Image (tube, rainbow, N blue to C red):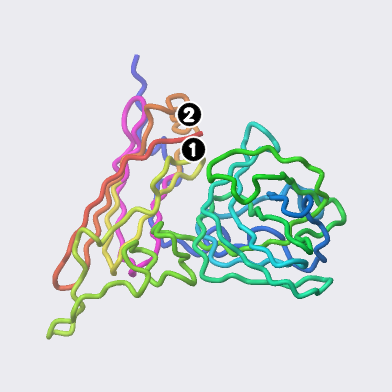
């Protein structure tokens, strides 16, 4: 016996298409120490000892949360005192299977700090950084001790960090290392992470004037203006690009995103492919400004979510988006993508 479920019984609020408003998840975020007001007193090993440090806990005792966003570290700040040394700031990724094993994911950023004898340390900044970071990654560092020994962590409260001695900042990118916890300090290292929508390695807020085009970090390309005064649109192949590229999280609200490089009339066609009858296609259309992230969403009910969950490998979201530049030239770009689901 075949059970047929209609579109209206599978979708609760049906679907929609709108501009994505800025949120905390898509804005610049602080990574590392919440502030740099502590006095650096912690060091690693003896002279000429190479060291790695990674954060484990915040001053409250909670586990260091890591970066709240995936993007690019665009600036770094560090409070230290002691001898002049070059610190290698690096993203560090926690291994899910071993609590104190971390993965260096690089690349490394050299961070020279001058020796000035100030007992409470001083803050050194590095701007114009291009250091990729994934949500959940932390900021650690490697260095080789000099004389006087550099101090890099504030001790007190429930702070904790992990440390390892030798090979320190010569650790090859991609190697794993288990860290001892004999380091009761909070690393005084802080960075600013920005989104990177086009994945060109430049932060969208301070480094990239055209976050929808990976080929440029200056203003978005604009063609010559013809005699009638209208702006000539970009080539149709460059008009539309998907922002969502990975598997979709199975939850009450399923969504995918894309952007147009110029003003565009968008028609999005979405089909939920299940084990059994497909749901849709659902068609949405509207006019949107250039460079704005556009989101298409649908809300499957419990029956549809249950079907996806039971047949996660066979279920998918089939999408087709057509963008038309409403100028007299009428450039058109149609992109299609099929999304799988993850639990």
Where's residue 33, x and y in %?
A: 71, 60
Residue 276, quarter of picture? top left
Q: How many marks do you count on the picture?
A: 2
* 125 to 200, vertically: above or below: below
* Residue 287 is covered by the magenta coloring: yes
| Residue 25 horizontal side relative to residue 228, left or right | right
60 or 272, nearer to the observer:
60
Q: Main secondary structure of the magenta part?
A: strand
In the picture of the structure, the residue carrying the numbered disc 2 is 309
**Residue visible at 31% across and 56% down in the picture:** 241
Q: Residues within 10 Å of mark 2 (few under 14, many from 20)?
A: some
- Percent from the top left, x then y, of residue 53? 70, 50
Horizontal and vertical percent position of residue 40: 80, 63
Magenta residues (range): 270-298
Q: Which image quadrant for residue 262?
A: bottom left
- The crowd level at tag 1 (other Cα within 10 Å; few <14, some 14-19, many 20+) is some
Q: Does 329 appear above or below 229?
A: above
**In terms of depth relative to the viewer, which is nearer, 248 or 193?**
193
Location of residue 183 in the rendering, given as x and y in whole percent from the top left corner: 80, 48
The disc label shown at residue 250, or none: 1
- Above or below, 79 relative to 162: below
Q: In the image, is residue 97 above or below residue 209?
A: above
């Amino acid at each position: 016996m075949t059970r047929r479920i209609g579109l209206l019984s599978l979708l609760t609020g049906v679907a929609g298409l709108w501009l994505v408003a800025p949120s905390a998840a898509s804005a610049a975020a602080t990574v590392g120490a919440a502030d740099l007001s502590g006095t650096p007193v912690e060091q690693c090993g003896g002279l000429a000892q190479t060291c790695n440090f990674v954060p484990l806990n915040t001053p409250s005792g909670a586990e260091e949360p890591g970066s709240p966003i995936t993007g690019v570290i665009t600036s770094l700040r560090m409070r230290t005192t002691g001898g002049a040394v070059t610190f290698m700031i690096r993203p560090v990724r926690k291994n899910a299977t071993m609590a104190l094993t971390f993965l260096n994911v690089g690349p490394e950023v050299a961070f020279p700090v001058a020796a000035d004898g100030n007992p409470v340390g001083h803050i050194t900044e590095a701007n114009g950084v291009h250091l990729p970071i994934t949500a959940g990654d932390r900021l650690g560092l490697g260095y080789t001790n000099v004389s006087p020994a550099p101090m890099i962590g504030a001790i007190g409260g429930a702070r904790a960090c992990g440390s390892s001695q030798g090979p320190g900042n010569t650790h090859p990118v991609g190697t794993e290392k288990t860290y001892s916890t004999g380091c009761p300090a909070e690393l005084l290292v802080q960075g600013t992470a920005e989104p990177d929508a086009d994945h060109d390695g430049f932060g969208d807020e301070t480094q990239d004037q055209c976050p929808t085009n990976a080929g440029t970090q200056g203003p978005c390309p604009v063609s010559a203006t013809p005699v009638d005064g209208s702006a000539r649109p970009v080539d149709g192949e460059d008009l539309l690009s998907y922002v969502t590229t990975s598997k979709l999280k199975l939850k009450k609200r399923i969504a995918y995103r894309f952007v147009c490089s110029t003003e565009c009339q968008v028609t999005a066609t979405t089909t939920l492919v299940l084990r059994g009858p497909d749901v849709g296609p659902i068609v949405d259309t509207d006019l949107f400004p250039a460079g704005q992230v556009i989101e298409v969403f649908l809300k499957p009910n419990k029956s549809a979510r249950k079907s996806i969950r039971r047949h996660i490998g066979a279920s998918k979201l089939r999408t087709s988006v057509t963008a038309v530049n409403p100028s007299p030239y009428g450039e058109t770009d149609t992109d299609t993508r099929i999304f799988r689901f993850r639990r």
